[in-house]
Structures are given as C-alpha cells and as structure tokens.
Image: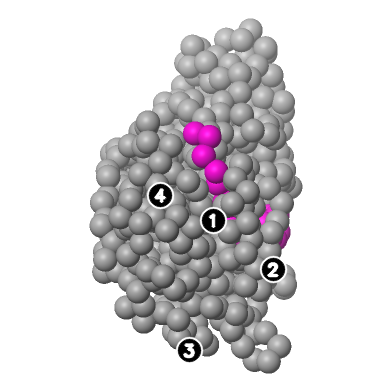
Amino acid sequence: MRVLVAVRCWSTTRTVRCLNLAAHRPVTVPTQYPRAPPATSSRPSTPWHRPPHRPDVLPGGQVCGAAQVSGGQGGRWVADSGYGPEEGNMTSDRLIEKAGSYLQRLCVGIPSRRVGCEGNRAATDLFARIVSSFAFRTESPEFDCIDWSQEGAHLTADRASFRVFVSPYSLGCRVRAPLVVVSTVEEMEDAEVSDKIVLLRGDIAKEQLMPKNFPFYNPDHHKRIIRSLEAREPRAIIAATSRDFVMVGSQYPFPLFEDGDFDIPSVYMTEEEGNRLAEHAGKEIWLESRAHRIPAKGCNVIARKGADPNRRVVVFAHVDARIGTPGANDNASGVIALLLLAELLAGYSGDLGIEIVALNGEDYFSNPGEQEYLAANAGKFGEIILGVNLDDVGYYRGKVAYSLYDCPSGIGSSIRTAFSNYDALVEGEPWDQGDHGLFLMNQRPALAMTSELLTELMAEITHTPRDRPEMVDPAKLVEVALALRDLLLALDQQRA
Ligand SMILES: [Zn+2]
C-alpha cells in the first residue's frame, strides 16, 4: 500500500517509491517495515478496537448499499450467478458472509502472504481456483523472487550488549571488527570503513533507502549512499534510525535497508542505542545476525472474460502482504472485492474485455509481480481503457474513497453515476502512489479505491500485526464489488 502524503509506497518504508509517481507528483514519503519492535505493539484502548464484523446498517435497517443496488444493467447481463436483477438485501447478506469467510481464509487460514512463501502461493492458488470457478479464463505467470527468514541478531561491544533488529531481506553474518561511526555520505566517502563494521546514524540514516535495483523511483542521494557502501565494502552495517511519525505504522526504529539485492549484511537499532554504541568507535565489536535468503517463485493471477480483449478494463489488487502482518486491510480487502466481483460477473457475456488481476509484489522490495505485468503488457497498454486499483478498501471506519486519474469525461461520468448508488463510497483526494501508477506511467486512465481514512489506517494498522480481519468490514467489500460490477456493465453497454 502506498499513499501520497504521510504514507507508504510501493512496498516499503521508503521515501516515495512509486510507480509513476516520480513523473506525476513527487512527494516525500517514508514507508516502513511491518515487524514493529515492541514499542509499537497493540494498544487495547484505541478506538480501532470494535466488535468484529458488524456490517454498517443504514437508517431503516438495510445493509449499506444493498438497497440501492439496481442489479445489472440489462442488455447482455446474464444473471446465472444468482446475483442478477432480483438481488437485494438477501444477496448482500450472502456476499457479506462470503467476504467474511474469505477474510478468515486469507488472513487466518494463511498465516503469511509475503512474496515467495508457501502462504503466498496458497493465496494465489486460492484466488485462481475461485475466479476459474466463475468461468474466467485464468493464467498464473511466474517470476523469480526470494523468501527470507531470520532468527534475530546479537551485538556486543566491550561486554555491553545492544538491541538490534535484522534488516528485512538482509544476509546474515558473524563478524568481529572495529567500529566506524558515520553521519553523512561525505564522511563515509572520507572514512576507512573497509573490513570494519560501520554505524550509520544521523543525516545518512534519516530515511529508508530505496532498493538499489528499484526501477520506478530512486533518488540520486540514495544511490550515492549505496554505491559508496558497496565500493568500500564494510563487513556489516548497523543503522541507528530515528522516529518518524509519518511512516506507516509509525515504526521505530525503521530499517534503513530493505533490499534483497544489497549484499552487505545489515541490522538496525534505535537512536538511543546508536548513541550508546557510538561511544565504542574505534574498538572491536561483535555482531551476529541470523538471516537467510531462500530462492523462490511467485506468480500473478490474471483472469479474463469478455469477447473483445482489445478493449478492456483491468481491475486489480495486490495479493501479497508485508512480512509480519496478516494484511487484512492491506490488501486482503482488495483481493476479496475482486473475488466478489468475479462472482457477480459469472454470467457476464459482453464485448468489453474484463481482466481481474491479483498482482503479487506491491509490498516486496522489487515489485516482481508489477514488473511481470508491465513486461507482459508491453505494447498492449493501448487496449486498456481503464485500470482500477483496489487497496485497503475495507477499513471498518470511514468510507471507501475513490479517485480518478486522467479519465476521459465519458468514463469519469460512468464511474460517478455507478458509484453514486452506494453509500459506502465517496469521491476522495488523489492518491498517487499505488499500483495504478502502472497505468498512469503508460498513459492509461486509472481509478483508485482506498479508505478515506488512509492516514489513520497507515499510522496505526497497516504493515503491523494489528491489520487483522476485525479491522475490515465485509459489507464495504460487497459494496465495492457491486459498484464495480455496475460500472463494468455500464461501460460494456456504452459500446453496444
Ligand atoms: Zn497495499
């Protein structure tokens, strides 16, 4: 999940690491790593804790949105899914129940959906199975990735020990070497860090660094730090990072590196621990970090329907979740809305090409699924009349905000007309840093849907262990799916 202001980006804690965003609106956005140290553990007294799964109810006792559903757009809509023109509260209730069950399967039955792990494969398999059952043609193109595991790290200096965390995707190490302390890139370029352990703190460690091979956004000052480290070859890196309240989940400390392509082992610690450790500059210290990279495979899932693939709408959500979070809002919510939409379109037989895609890698350091999708569609983006990104669409508080990007007026008015029937949806602020950037960077119109309370969600829940099913309202997912179904049928009819 990435967001514009106070948010996150294409997969981590970093400063705007987004898709097209560099080209669109440059913004500084720290992101972050979900494995929150204990300081950010759960807060039982926060208002987020509500009874699980209470569908929002409208005055009059109707489940939100359901009463307004017109049910299909007539024409070529075939209601063999059971969700045709007669749908109403009963249908909504069935879908809400189903959404709740999908939530449990994706976030509880599957303990982790991090790219490369068994759970990630289980999630993509489940998605492929379900959409195939609704008569979509499905394919699951694979990509190489790594899975990663760690069992902690241990740091001592002169018999004092220090609390350190392993940087996500780092290699492990067992190193005894002198400590060098560095606060700026200029200092590092002048220092003798070869064969030493280097402590980065202060200015050089103020924001998470983009992964070295991240293709979409990578500022020069990040590249300079990485280049400088690789040229000087310290044996290991310790990063003392500060508190940053705009980071997702407000993680403190945050990992300066989250990069499976960067091969110098690294750990991170709080500023306070960094100050204490700096007193040992010039002395030998001992660092052991137990971490492992595991070669793995992942896949996107692409499901298609409709007679004309050369004029298509792509509706997508990222299926992966960050390490250390059940990822209920981010982004089981979007995936479940896609599954419900697939079911609502089981009987679709229109001309408009409909592509439902589980992208796999938005919360992984190198965005492999997004890159796979870009490569597979090279030269074919012109066929896409609209890309629709669903990310964090089920937060139990607030409404689902939608925003339009470069949409022609006809498509824009179709969106607003279709969505106006659903009380859970509201037009919101632009949010430039999600996977819809894939479409914007290819000059295609896009629609993004996320929580209108994204800032709150990101500050407290996203990327943390607290992003659990009870943070998601299944009724909102049903409204998103119904609204998208209406939109797709309207766009199909416009062409008829
Ligand atoms: Zn997300």
Upstream in sequence: badge 4 or badge 3: 3
What segment is highlighted magenta in the picture? 442-462
Upstream in sequence: badge 2 or badge 3: 3
The spot of residue 358 in percent (x, y) is 39, 53
| Within-10-Å neighbours for mark 1: few <14, some 14–19, many 20+ | many
Residue in front for this viewpoint, 468 or 125: 125
Name the element at disc 4: strand
Task: Identify the residue shown where x is 70% and y is 56%.
Answer: 428
Of circles 3 and 1, which is in front? 3
Q: Tag 2: residue type?
A: Gly
The spot of residue 141 in percent (x, y) is 27, 45
Upstream in sequence: badge 4 or badge 2: 4
Q: Which residue lies furthest to the front in this view?
A: 496
Residue in front for this viewpoint, 25 or 310: 310
In the picture of the structure, the residue carrying the numbered disc 1 is 391
Q: Tag 4: residue type?
A: Arg
Name the element at disc 1: loop
Task: Identify the residue shown where x is 39% and y is 55%.
Answer: 352
Q: Are marks 2 and 1 in contact (CB under 8 Å)?
A: no
Name the element at disc 2: loop
In the picture of the structure, the residue carrying the numbered disc 3 is 90
- Above or below, 470 relative to 437: below
Q: Do the residues labelled 1 and 4 touch (CB within 8 Å)?
A: no
Q: Tag 3: residue type?
A: Met
Give the image quarter of residue 51.
bottom right
For disc 1, does the CB lie below 8 Å from ligand 1? yes
Residue in front for this viewpoint, 27 or 389: 389
- Above or below, 108 relative to 146: below
In the picture of the structure, the residue carrying the numbered disc 4 is 312
In the picture of the structure, the residue carrying the numbered disc 2 is 398
Q: Does the magenta run of residues contain 446?
A: yes
